[in-house]
Amino acid sequence: MKLDAKIPSGPLESKWTRYLSEIKLVNPANKRKYEIIVVGSGLGGAAAAATLGELGYHVKCFCYQDSPRRAHSIAAQGGINAAKNYQNDGDSVYRLFYDTIKGGDFRAREANVYRLAEVSAEIIDQCTAQGVPFAREYGGHLANRSFGGAQVSRTFYARGQTGQQLLLGAYSALCRQIQAGTVTMFPRTEMLDLVVVEGHAKGIVVRDMVTGEISSHSADAVVLATGGYSNVYDLSTNARGCNVTAAFRAYKRGAAFANPCYTQIHPTCIPVSGEYQSKLTLMSESLRNDGRVWVPKEKGDSRSPQEIPEEDRDYFLERKYPSYGNLAPRDISSRSAKEVCDEGRGVGPGGLGVYLDFSDAINRLGLDTIRERYGNLFEMYERITGEDAYHTPMRIYPALHYTMGGLWVDYNLMSNLPGLHVIGEANFSDHGANRLGASALMQGLADGYFILPYTIGAYLADCKGKRPPTDHPDFRAVEKEVEERTRKLLSINGKRSTQSIHRELGKLMWEKAGMARNADGLREAVSRIPGIREEFWQNVQVPGEGGEINQELEKAGRLADFLEFGELLCRDALDRNESCGGHFREEFQTKEGEALRNDEEYSYVSAWEFQGENQEPVLHKEPIVYDEVKMATRSYK
Amino acid sequence: MDLKLRVWRQKDRNSSGKLVEYDARDIDPEMSFLEMLDVVNERLIDSGDEPIAFDHDCREGICGACSATINGIPHGPHRATTVCQLHMRHFQDGDTLTIEPFRARAFPVIRDLMVDRTAFDRIVEAGGYISVGTGSAPEANTLPIPKDQAERAMDAASCIGCGACVAACKNASAMLFVAAKSSHLNTLPQGKPEKERRVLSMVAAMDEAGFGNCTNQYECSAVCPKSISEDFIGQLNREYFVASIKQQFTTK
Ligand code: FES
């Protein structure tokens, strides 16, 4: 396998502009002749499908939801970063670039990140023009807030519903193209496999989730915008339907999977309340702007939070990281919370929680200001816990939230499999080992609106040979495999529900490959996962039939892939004998308990190549080379 | 707590359905409503029965996928709350809950509690956007927008497209949904150039999809999980009135 990142030459600041002026263009008259498949309709997918449609391509867009407007990007609350420097606080493209590289613990690709920072400002212009109702100052100009991991205020937001508003903007652009006839939308349609013809990705096999029909679609290029894999942990902040199937199927067809062990834990989620829990709810990290995180100094302090006086409270983030305080990056905040809970100082049921206290902010700014800033988050908290956070501190605990790893892509956002492009959370490229808050929305939209629609031209302009018809033998063969697998799932007729097995996998992953990992635990996970997989294929119960709406069948198909993918994640975590970003290996930490990176041996992207069923995958390394920045120890003290 | 459930079961779009009774025992009041259904479903699967199909995804009240009518109220009895965020602590031990899909001519039931809401997408496709291609936007701060205008647009834009408004309306009208989208865009200066075309085409698409007429009862707003105000229906009516008069003059 050859991994060529295809980074343009020249100085960092001019790579992208030069690339744009030198890229081969597809003749406008010819664009109509190309068909492009986009899988997923979140920020990346909807933005890409709409823009490709505007450019004149024929686009087919697929999503598993009943409407493209429901993709999980909609749940992002906090905001979107952009180097506009509206606050005149010294922000710049370079600073956003540097913060992202540093936040990613020096494991992201320089050229990709610089480009991301460069296009960030344009995203705000585009979204504003679409009618995204960003928060404004009294003077009518756009407002900003600050976010974890940055000392400037560069986050744009729409109340606590930024993801929703940006997605509805992208969805409206998509709808406009559907109306214009350039995009055909396939809702309630799930991609179950990728079709590779003569070494090029040329189509997909899908299941119509209403009729159960399995069919093929061919195209000149395929774009995956299928999100992340947090649900391998069963409990995460992802929507229940989020899954790794599309990406994992692509991996099994030859695309390299990069850095699967880079997972992000979000520090401000509502703690688990019981075994039946079906998902974890995140509350925007923006809460940390005004909330102070603390636990009692003594373990086992059972007083109510109001009864605990100042001197008995430990504001542990402010104590340990005086310059960033409550705004310390996500991984650091999460681990600190785990530490104090491990010491027995956690609060709430099970002791798995820390306080996020707004009383100082309410005294300082008044109840109305707090209500205006966070009203909907406080309501959300109340709805779930039955508690009023204006009067008693919230309880929060970290949860799986985002995955930085994903399919390997080059500068063109194309995987090593020609024709297969991967954007947004589904690729690995921009966040290194840890993503900064408010950067996921930025990346999804950057890829979808401003990068992929141009870089895909590089492949199409060169792409000789027409797309194959869907009755091509390679399509037929994949269709047959998919049908076979569906039949198999339905015929096991065992004793356990899919969910019970997913729970088992999730627990193991969280314990051994969650917030903190070590070699023994990871080895144990690698040896135990095949057993759970075996149990699944022998003993799962998938009721109903294939030719109808069958939600259990959908879940089982997704879990089957998670059961293989989880093992890959653990193998990657085991290979990486260092701590960096979201990947914390207990054996590699400083005396103060901070992550200990090993730049000498591990400055590489791990790209895994599938070798066949039940074979160990092969690791390829793409070295990480920095021309512009110097690797430094990430310090937020 | 122990509950009795009466749940609408229907195999597919073309079959007829009926209410079937189930016992839901040992339900933890801290569960969400959908978690309660998960538990019931796991038990159904264990006993070899087919689980109850229902739409859901984010389970945090924002994607708009979940949809069920509980004891006659879309999204259930708790105000401003989607069914995925409704918690069992709001019910009493021994309650009987009748759980049905959102009912409307334009939302055919496709299985159990799942309905087809693609009619909403068709309405947005008809004009629920601002026509601005990627890359052609001016610098964002060149157009200051008064804070109250932006806030009003945001109030309207909070709609999650779940369809509860339609299910609550005795005429199965989609006016609140259409009004929320058109008011969001028409309130902002960016949306003004297409304002009239927008309301005319969205309302036409709504009629074509088979939604009923609005008779100003505002059941829609009362059940809306995002509390979208009925004021927006007033705004839509005014804008529609102006737009149709203008249209008559221009076509003559
Ligand atoms: S499941 Fe998303 S709003 Fe209820």
Image: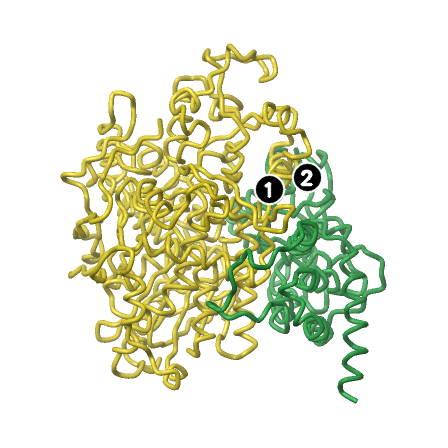
Chain colours: A yellow, B green
Q: Residue at x 19, y 43 (%)?
A: A603
Instruction: Give the number of the disc on residue B36.
Output: 1
Q: Tags 2 and 1 in contact by the CB under 8 Å rule?
A: yes
Tell me the element at label 2.
strand
**Nearest-to-viewer mark from 2 and 1:** 1
At label 2, the amino acid type is Leu
Instruction: Classify mark 1: residues with Cα within 10 Å, few (<14), some (14-19) or many (20+).
Output: many
- Tell whether B114 sits left or right of A9: right
| Image spot of residue A27 (x, y percent) | 35, 83
Give the camera-side residue of B135 and B27: B135
Instruction: Give the number of the disc on residue B3.
Output: 2
Q: Quadrant of the N terminus of chain B?
A: top right
Tell me the element at label 1.
helix
At label 1, the amino acid type is Met
User: Chain for mark 2?
Assistant: B
Give the camera-side residue of B215 and A285: A285
* Residue B177 makes an appearance in the image: no
Instruction: Give the number of the disc on residue A480.
Output: none
* Residue A636 makes an appearance in the image: yes
User: Chain for mark 1?
Assistant: B
| Image spot of residue B240 (x, y percent) | 78, 71
Q: In whole angstroms, how far apart are the C-alphas of marks 2 and 1? A: 10 Å
| Image spot of residue A161 (x, y percent) | 57, 48
- Tell whether A215 sits left or right of A594: right
| Image spot of residue A416 (x, y percent) | 23, 63
Indicate which disc, 2 or 1, sits on the residue closer to the N terminus.
2
Give the camera-side residue of A552 and A270: A270
